[in-house]
Every structure is written in structure tokens, then in C-alpha cells.
Amino acid sequence: MDPELAPDNQELEKFGYKQQLDRSMGRFSSFAISFSLISIITGITANFSFGVQQVGGSIIWSWSLVSFGQFFVALVMADLAVRFPISGYGYQWTSRLTSAHVGFFVGWFLLMQFITGFPGVCQALAETIDFNNANDDWYITLVTLGIISLIALVHLFSIRIVTMVNNGGVYVELLGVALLIILLWGSFVFVSNFDFANLFDTTNHETDNKAGVSSFALSLLVGAWCLTGFEAAADLAEETRDPCKTVPKAVIFSLLSAAIAGFVLIGGLLLAADSINLIQISKNPLRLILESQFGSVVANITVVIILFSIFACGVACMATATRLIYSMARDNMLPFSTYLRRIHPRYKIPRNATIAVWLLGCLFVVTVRELSLITSISTVAGYLGYCGIIWASMNSVKLKEKQGSFSLGKYRRLIQTVALIWTITVVAALTIPSNVSLGIAHLSAKSTFISLMIGITIYFFTIKNRINKGNAGPPN
């Protein structure tokens, strides 16, 4: 065993666990897993059209609001990652700060975020691969199933391969975003036909009327779905070297870099768009804008960047989901925990948890094939999980400072309060307005409620008794 890892492994043992996973991730890999899961290119590809449909070019200001609110959430996550460098992040944090009963529901919401978000990412990639714009639902579904299976195969060998693939995807995305920003804004400086008024368009293109409060609330989905996942670095803390120093930096810098780059990229796309109306009816608005302004060669290069970026995002999403399942199963907090917590003796990865995410992802994408619905369910569930984490963090009596590590200090309670208000606001914004474009009013709220009922059923029939008998929950 590497002697440099001894302090990290000893820190883990204080929480009642032995080191089983492969602790091989460094600083960049920790940043990359979070940045890749945020993936601004994936977010723009998946939801940009929906956001523009709701509020036109004002989507850039919706993005700015989400960036501001998520910064406070990231600060809370970074603070907790220092104190509990354990796989399972939100489930572990909440269970240890409150109780395993509360921890189960926070873990359940986070699972719903990634179990639905993972196939959502894969479907966004499938729609990008649909070069002929066939828009055939079953074609997209079959390609999505193939992508899910390919990502699962990558995960079944080792975290080192996952890290290598993810790092490569992040390098491509960072370079691609930089080139796109230079291209778009450079052209804006030298070409006069770019429309600055697009940034202030407030038209709801479903009704052709001025967007109201309800439309602006729904437009938050673009940033709210995209600017999440920065906590993924915390979920892989047991596979990260010196996690108490590495993870908090990865959480904060991944969010800040994605928020700023996303703002500049969205601004450039809106300025370059010939017609805001065309964006909201396109399944690939990024390619549409670039092809209209710079030709097919630039558009095709962009598609390659998008493919790499979304694939890396899918890899990161599955990594987060499987580690969360492994952490909960290790504590006997899920059905079939004995099966789900097994670690492959050679590759040191949660193989059975990976198989479970693969099967659940395939099942979900076959039964729910509307991308906007998938991403809205993922977002609502994720923010409900955030609410639970932040509420638990406000139980500051149990939080102890660590010398020389990241800390919120005297501003902790203020930051926690702002973060909690923000996350509650996002949940309300995505569930209260009636969005009939998906066929049924309040469909995302109703779908999330169904997932909650499933969690409640599992809790009362299985998990509650285990916890009460002392057979489940984190070690004391």
C-alpha cells in the first residue's frame, strides 16, 4: 500500500469504514469529475431550446440567477466535504448530522437525480448523433440504450479507466468551449449583423406573448439542471488523494468555471442567432447557430466536441450514481444491499451497483422518452436532496472545524440560509407553474411525487425497521 495514502485511509477508518476502493484520483481528476458532470455543452444541448421557448434571449439572465444561487450551495457542499470525506456524500452527511431516517430520504432524492439524469445525458448524446434529424423516437431510444451500455462497460473495469476517459472528455470540452467563445465573440467584434437585442428578448415562443413570471420560473431549468453535479467530487472522496484539501477546491472551482464559461457561451450564441424563434424549435440549437454563421465545417467540428463532452458527462454521472448506491448499500440502506455493496476484488469498483444503474437507466429511457421531462424530474429530485443536505448542515452543533482546511467560518449560517432559500425557490419554480408543453400540467411535479412515493414505500416496508433495530445506517 502506498504510504502516502495512509493518512487518508486512517481518516476513513474514523468513520467506521475500511479502504476498499482504489484511491488513485488526483487534483485534476477530482475537478474533472465535477466539471464533466456539470458539462455546460451538455446542458445547452439538452435544454437550451426549452429555455428559449419560455423566455427568449433572456435565458442568459435566468442562467445568471441560477449561477448566483448555486454558488452558495457549492460553498455548503465544500464545507461538508472537508468534515465528511466519504462516498455517498449527501446521504452520509445528512445521516451523521441528523439521523439515518432523514439520510435515507436525502439519499433517495439524490439517487433519483442521477438515475434519471444519467439516461437524460445519454439521450442528449443520442439526439446529437441523429445527424439526419430523423426525430424517430425509437431510433433515439435504441441509440440511447447503446450509449448507456457502452458507459457501463467503461465502468466495469476500473476507476482509472473512468478517470482517463473523463479527463480526456474534460480537456476536449475546455478546449472546445474556449474556441467557441473566441469564435463567437471574435466574430461579434468584426461582423455587424450580430443582434445585441437578442440578449433582451423576453418573448414566450409558445404563446408569442411577453414572458411572465411563470415562464421565467420554468426557464430556470436550463441552468438548474446544468449547474449541478459539482458535488460529484465529494461522492468520489474515497477514491481521491488528500480529499479534505482536494475535494472542496474541486467543488467550488468546477461550479465557478462552468457558470462563467456558460454565461459567455450563451451570450455569444444569442448574439450570433439569426432568429430566436428558430432556436426554440431546434433539437440542436448550438449546431444550428454555428452552421448558419460559420458554415458546415465549423458546425461539424462542434458536433465532435459535443459528442466527447456529453459522453464524459455520462461517465461522470454513472460514477456518482454507483458510488452513492454503494455507500447506501454498505450501510444496509437499500433493498438488495448485500448484492449492491460488493466490490470487485481485482478492479476495486462497485460492480453490482454499476450493473444496477445500467439496468435502471435502460428501463427509465424506454418508459420515459421525453428529454425535457427526464431532465425536469432529475432537477426537482436533485434540489430536494440539496434542501435536505443544507437543512442538515444548519445543525452546526455537530460540525467541527478542521485546522488548515476550507471553512465557511463566521459566515456559515448566512451562507446556509441563502442556499436553503435558493434551493426551495428552484423546487417551487419548477413544480408550481403549469407546463402543458409536455402534455400534462405539472408533469414534472407529479412524476417526482411518484418517485417519492416509491421511496416512502421502500422506507416503511424495509429500511425503517432495519434502522430501528440497529441493522442499518452509518457506523457510530
Image: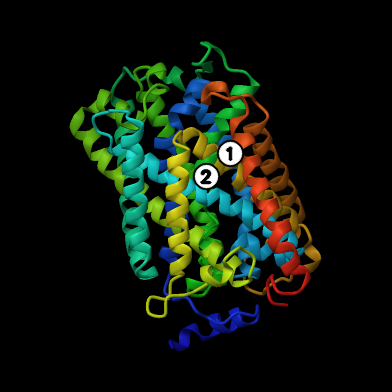
User: Decide: marks 2, 1 in contact (CB < 8 A)?
Assistant: yes
Earlier in the chain: of badge 2 and badge 1, it is: 1
User: Which residue bears the numbered disc 2?
Assistant: 227
Which residue occupies 42% across, 58% down?
Answer: 32
The N terminus sits in image quarter: bottom left
- Which residue is at the front of the view, 355 or 240? 355
Q: Is residue 367 visible?
A: yes
Direction front: furthest residue? 461
Give left or right: position of 262 versus 332: left
Callout 2: helix, strand or loop?
loop
The C terminus sits in image quarter: bottom right
What's the distance in space between the residues labelled 2 and 1, CA to CA? 8 Å
In percent of width and height, residue 161 lies at 33, 67
- Which residue is at the front of the view, 341 or 163? 341
Amino acid type, label 2: Leu
Q: Quadrant of residue 418?
A: top right
Give left or right: position of 184 versus 102: left
In percent of width and height, residue 224 lies at 56, 40
Q: Residues within 10 Å of mark 2 (few under 14, many from 20)?
A: many
In percent of width and height, residue 57 lies at 48, 23
Q: Residues within 10 Å of mark 1 (few under 14, many from 20)?
A: many
- Which residue is at the front of the view, 221 or 123? 123
Give left or right: position of 272 versus 476: left
Q: With respect to residue 294, does 344 lie above or below?
A: below
User: Which residue bears the numbered disc 1?
Assistant: 66
Q: Is residue 127 visible?
A: no
Q: Quadrant of residue 162?
A: bottom left
Callout 1: helix, strand or loop?
helix
Amino acid type, label 1: Val
